[in-house]
Image (spheres, rainbow, N blue to C red):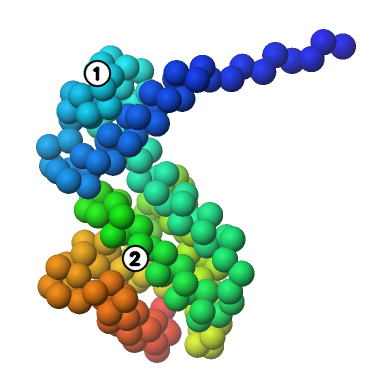
């Protein structure tokens, strides 16, 4: 029986896609408001037509870029061998590192549509965020005696409190990254207690 033919992407296609995403990342970090296909193409040293071959719009390119960042965090979270509060703290530190690395580009995770609505409809990016944080947040909840049924709202609160814009704002206001994350963690723990006492 003949073996099926496996079609692999050409090396130059893979290389071009990487160059485009790298260029998009640089522009999104430095000047996200002015991101355009033309500017990204120039930074990647490819034609605008080449960019359009992979991405239909700037929004589609940004979604792919941000998805790749969240996949990094998801993989880190899945591979972490810690448990309980230590797991949460470790993955949070990695998130802080990513925020410092990718800067204001991570704030583009924000959308006019609500977080829970995006999660309920299976938005790929938000599902990846959920995959990254399910183990750490559930471990934290267990360590605080919080019932698992509160998980979706705990993730919702996490999304609000650990907004990359606010992490960067605290850092720009003079706090180093560990201090900023510690301050936000204290607020998050208080919010979790409020969530459970509210009986949602």
The earlier-in-sequence mark between 2 and 1 is 1
Q: CA distance from mark 2 to mark 1?
A: 33 Å
Question: Residue sitting at 43 percent across and 25 percent down?
Answer: 15
Where 12 sits versus 23, above or below? above
Q: Is residue 106 visible?
A: no
Return the mark for residue 96: 2
Q: Position of residue 39 (x, y in %)?
A: 17, 28
Quadrant location of residue 1? top right
Left/right of residue 39 with respect to residue 113 in the rendered view:
left
Q: Position of residue 88 (x, y in %)?
A: 48, 74
Q: Residue furthest right?
A: 1
Left/right of residue 57 with respect to residue 149 in the rendered view:
left
Return the mark for residue 48: 1
Question: Residue sitting at 14 percent across and 68 percent down?
Answer: 172
Return the mark for residue 32: none
Q: Position of residue 42 (x, y in %)?
A: 20, 24
Quadrant location of residue 27? top left
Quadrant for the C terminus in the image: bottom left
Where 40 sits versus 78, above or below? above
Question: Residue sitting at 46 percent across and 68 percent down?
Answer: 91
Neighbourhood count class around disc 2 (C-alpha, 10 Å): few under 14, some 14–19, many 20 upward = many
Q: Secondary structure at mark 2?
A: helix
Q: Exactly how many numbered labels are in the figure?
A: 2
Neighbourhood count class around disc 1 (C-alpha, 10 Å): few under 14, some 14–19, many 20 upward = some
Say which of 127 and 10 sits in front.
Answer: 10
Q: Position of residue 100 (x, y in %)?
A: 28, 60
């Amino acid at each position: 029986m003949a073996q099926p033919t496996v079609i692999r992407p050409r090396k130059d296609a893979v290389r071009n896609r990487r160059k485009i995403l790298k260029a998009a990342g640089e522009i999104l970090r430095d000047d996200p408001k002015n991101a355009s296909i033309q500017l990204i193409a120039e930074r990647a040293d490819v034609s605008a037509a080449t960019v359009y071959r992979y991405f239909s719009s700037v929004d589609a390119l940004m979604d792919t870029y941000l998805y790749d960042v969240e996949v990094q965090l998801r993989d880190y979270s899945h591979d972490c061998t810690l448990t309980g509060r230590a797991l949460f703290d470790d993955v949070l530190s990695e998130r802080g590192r990513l925020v410092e690395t990718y800067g204001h580009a991570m704030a583009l995770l924000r959308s006019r549509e609500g977080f829970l609505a995006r999660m309920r409809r299976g938005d790929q990016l938000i599902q990846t965020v959920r995959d990254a944080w399910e183990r750490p947040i559930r471990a934290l909840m267990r360590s605080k005696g919080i019932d698992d049924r509160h998980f979706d709202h705990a993730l919702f609160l996490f999304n609000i409190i650990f907004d990359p814009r606010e992490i960067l704002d605290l850092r720009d206001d003079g706090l180093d990254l560990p201090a900023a994350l510690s301050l936000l963690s204290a607020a998050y723990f208080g919010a979790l207690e409020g969530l459970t006492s509210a009986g949602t």
